[in-house]
Image: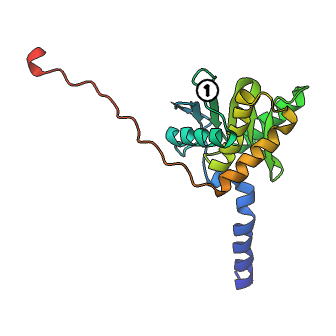
Amino acid sequence: MSLAAIAKLVVLTVLVLPGITGCAAKNTYRMDRDPDIVHSRFAIIQNYGTAPVDPRQVDALMMEVAALLGVAVEPSVRKVRIVITAPQNIDGLARVVAARSSENWAWASHRHGYAEAAYLPKVSVILIPYFDRIILGHELAHYLTDHYLKQVPLAQWEEVADRVERKLWVAKPAPLTPAAPTLVAAEEPAAMR
């Protein structure tokens, strides 16, 4: 193989392959088995990916987005369900929902010609391909607008989420709170057995 052919192959691999694989480089998916399900303070995280998601990061981001929107998250409001799934599943579901709905039932962030993430307001579900502060922050803005900013018309939801996204780009991530200690029952003393 000539040096020119090798150079073309390297350029093709570096420039084209990431666009084709998309999020697969950041996460792989286990669609053939049940997802990992984790409950955080504000969310139910259903992860079909292999990359773990720290629920403390999700809660910290929820609080950060809520602060940017000027809302206080209340425990009485339905938790958001965050589903980490393959990009083709997100795109397929967003297209099906949009085609079958007469109203704005799904908000999808389209990048590179496909839906990268989506928020389904009537069921409070966010679909993302992997944990990313900007992507998830944008979708959390839709969730918070849906539940706390009822005065904002649907036509302006995307503007609100885009403003939050821009602010998240320049903000430093909020520090994580320490994990709550795991309580383990003490072993029964030998004398009581």
Left or right for 92, reference 141: right
- Which residue appears farthest toward the front when viewing the image? 70
- Which residue appears farthest toward the right when viewing the image? 102
The picture places residue 165, in percent across and down from the top left corner, at 71, 49
- Name the image quarter holding residue 139: top right
- Which residue appears farthest toward the bottom when viewing the image? 3
Q: Quadrant of the C terminus?
A: top left
* Number of numbered discs visible in the structure rendering: 1
Q: Residue at x 74, y 67 (%)?
A: 15
| 63 or 9: nearer the viewer | 63
The picture places residue 78, in percent across and down from the top left corner, at 63, 23
Q: Residue at x 58, y 39 (%)?
A: 63
The picture places residue 7, in percent across and down from the top left corner, at 71, 79
Q: Residue at x 70, y 27 (%)?
A: 124
Residue marked by disc 1: 79
| Circle 1 residues within 10 Å: few <14, some 14–19, many ≥20 | some
Q: Residue at x 63, y 23 (%)?
A: 77
- Name the image quarter holding residue 84: top right
Q: Secondary structure at mark 1?
A: loop
Q: Is residue 157 visible?
A: yes
Q: Quadrant of the N terminus?
A: bottom right
| 118 or 86: nearer the viewer | 118
Left or right for 79, reference 96: left
- Which residue appears farthest toward the top when viewing the image? 192
Q: Is residue 116 visible?
A: no
Vertical order, 192 against 185 (above or below): above
The picture places residue 67, in percent across and down from the top left corner, at 63, 41
Vertical order, 55 against 79 (above or below): below
- Name the image quarter holding residue 144: top right
Q: Amino acid at mark 1?
A: Lys
